[in-house]
Image (tube, rainbow, N blue to C red):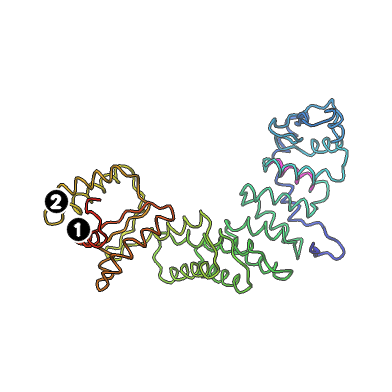
Amino acid sequence: MVHFDSDKKGSSFFPNTKATKLLISKALPSSERDKNGGKQELSVSLHPLFSAGTPKKKSEMLGYKKDEQHCFPLSSPVLLPTKPLNSEEWEKIKENFEQKDIFENWMMTQMIKYNCSIDIAKSLLSWVARKNNGIVGYKLLVSYLTLCVSQSQTTEVIDVYEIIKSRYRTLEPEGYTLLIWGLIHSDKWRETLILLEGIKNILSPSKRNYGDCIEGALLHQEVNLAWNLYLEMLNHRIIPNWETLQAFFDFAKGMKNNQFEGRLFDILLYLRHNHMYPTEPFAQSIKEWFESGQCSACGRMLEPNHLNSEEYEFLKQRVLKHVLDGGEQYRKTIPKEISRFENFIKSCSPFDIVIDGLNITKMFPNFPCITDKYYRYEVTAYIKSQDQDTEFYLHRMLKSLICLEYGVDEGE
């Protein structure tokens, strides 16, 4: 664990006026309302402990007396308040808690575990700050920060950051990671770069540290900064998370920037050279990026190629009418062949792969033997060996030549 320096020599904690006022003020309104409303009963309750042994002994081991009245949430098997408490209420709970030296940290740990209301956690910190002249232990602060980050309480994260920044020159890795994660969505996101440099003074930043800073830069349109951080990762031989790579493609959807597109292709080349296969969410993001480009002719955004049943039926009829029929049946085929083809399509399950024999012939105009033999039989046989249903379209003349060569009837 990293040693924590403080501005006061020989002491890890010392009074700070700004921090004291900030912590105490968090629960002041509820405390004042409690005082004005007169004495109130302790707002905690006991929930049964569903485990082996005597429930009474279990409760006594946790430091609670049987005659106390409590009101804890039924969904939680631990003892937690359901609303913010004032100082007197917290004092009374601690009096009945057996291990008083760990009470505050134990309570905050339970709040994190069961995703307790942030207001209840603030009342705990306010109570600790009041009784200790504004001093809150580092461990308790980081635990509270964990709860704030998990609930996306950006304002609270900033408050805790200001307190920690005023008291500690150096943090442990967990503290840096939580602050970076919690600040990237705020106006103070550039502070994450300072925190990243702070990590470098101790050890090499993790892929998550870099990834969160990159995400923060992209969220605030700082593309060059995000790319430079990415290159810095690679220079330090740190493999990015899939979420970090995906953030670049998510950011690029719908935008037209040749330089940034080149960078995305660099990422794809990086994946290919290192034999890295994207996760399904990342692959979907790449797919959507390819489909979200602009038409080079009209400049309009390309639409996704997902069709509903009505759109598919409309497209199918257009193909049958304008491609297969073409307005002149006897020039391309005859009505009997079209009818036979339509019946054939209806009788078959959907094909995995469709090969257009005429286009293959156009690709190899000077090698009809390669086109007819290799692509018709070898390629199709290979695809079928991979359990893929394949349909091979041929021009009538090609079909006649192949059938003549292999002694196959044209009707087969």
Q: Amino acid at mark 2?
A: Ile
Q: Which mark is residue 334?
A: 2
Q: Which mark is residue 396?
A: 1
Asked if residue 388 can be seen in this view, the reply is yes
Residue 248 image point, x, y percent = 50, 63
Q: Which residues are magenta?
A: 119-128
| Horizontal arrangement in the rendering, residue 246 relative to residue 312 (left or right) | right
> Among all residues in the image, which is located at the extreme front?
407
Per the image, label 2 sits on a secondary structure element best described as loop
The residue shown at (34%, 58%) is: 301
The residue shown at (79%, 32%) is: 51
Mark positioned earlier in the residue sequence (1 or 2): 2
The reply to whether the C-beta atoms of the residues labelled 1 and 2 are less than 8 Å apart is: no
**56 or 132: which is nearer to us?**
56
Q: Which mark is residue 285?
A: none
Residue 76 image point, x, y percent = 71, 34
Secondary structure mainly formed by the magenta segment: helix
The residue shown at (85%, 66%) is: 9
Per the image, label 1 sits on a secondary structure element best described as helix
Q: Is residue 391 above or below residue 405?
A: above
> Among all residues in the image, which is located at the extreme top?
67
Mark 1 to mark 2 CA distance (whole Å): 11 Å
Residue 412 image point, x, y percent = 25, 51
